[in-house]
Amino acid sequence: MPPTSIPVPSLRRLPSYLRRLHIAVEQGVAYVSSRQLGAAAGVPAAQVRKDLTWVDQEGRPGRGYEARALAAQLELTLGLREQKRAVLVGAGNLGSALAAYPGFGPCGLRIVALFDKDPAVVGKRVAGFVVQPVDSLARVAAEHQVDMGIITVPAEAAQSVAEAMVAAGIGVIWNYAPTTLRLDAGIYVQNQDLAAELALLSYQIVRRRGE
């Protein structure tokens, strides 16, 4: 079943289940219960069973889910075994950190190029990449058959970068800029608003101080 047919809340929980299953496999544990999977995602066992109706695996009464088989099915459902190529625009601190992040590899994601518009940055080596000018984006995207664009530029530059990615044939965008992108409905945008997440954490800190 294609991942696009899975409801987003369920889809967001599947990686948590997968991490718990990987731990079980590493420890030599054959079966994992829906309760254990639920604990990993912070949901009840009933929700786990409902989420897993979207994948082609069933648990065994009294034993749970076969860890290795379910992990393999989740990897297939999430597309983690397929190789995916991305470009990243914005070679500042955040972009450099993401370009060097080793956790993308196990998910099948490989960043193939890093871009920036600052002439002082273009040509420099950052996180193992020679930073290229943004006007090379379309050529590189075509050469590498890029699947995804990652945006780590200031908010005021994000829209034009996103439009350049779309013009280059990129249909999936991971946006770290604190702004809403205005793109065609056929473009999938995942916003990663670090400022909003920090605001939530700040609220929790202040609330706890007042207790």
Image (spheres, rainbow, N blue to C red):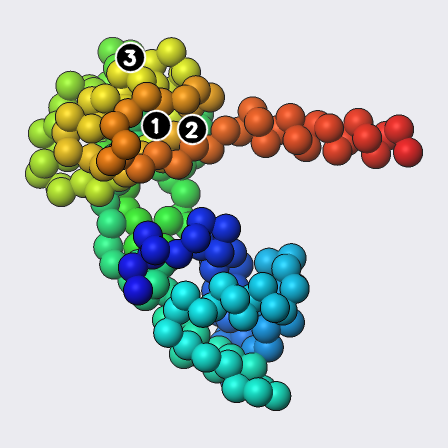
Check disc 1 and give the amino acid type: Ile
- Picture quadrant where residue 31 is located: bottom right
Q: Is residue 51 left or right of residue 63?
A: left
Find the distance from the CA under tag 3 to the CA under tag 2: 18 Å
Q: Residue drawn 9% across and 29% down?
A: 139
Q: CA distance from mark 3 to mark 1?
A: 15 Å
Q: Amino acid at mark 2?
A: Tyr
Q: In front here: 112 or 180?
A: 180
Instruction: Using the numbered discs, state the Cα–Cα distance from disc 1 to disc 2 in whole angstroms.
Output: 6 Å
Image x and y of residue 111, in percent: 28, 41
Report the residue marked by disc 1. Answer: 151
> Which residue is labeled 2 in the image?
176
Quadrant containing the N terminus is bottom left
**Mark positioned earlier in the residue sequence (3 or 2):** 3
Residue 118: mark:
3
Image height of 207 relative to 71, above or below: above
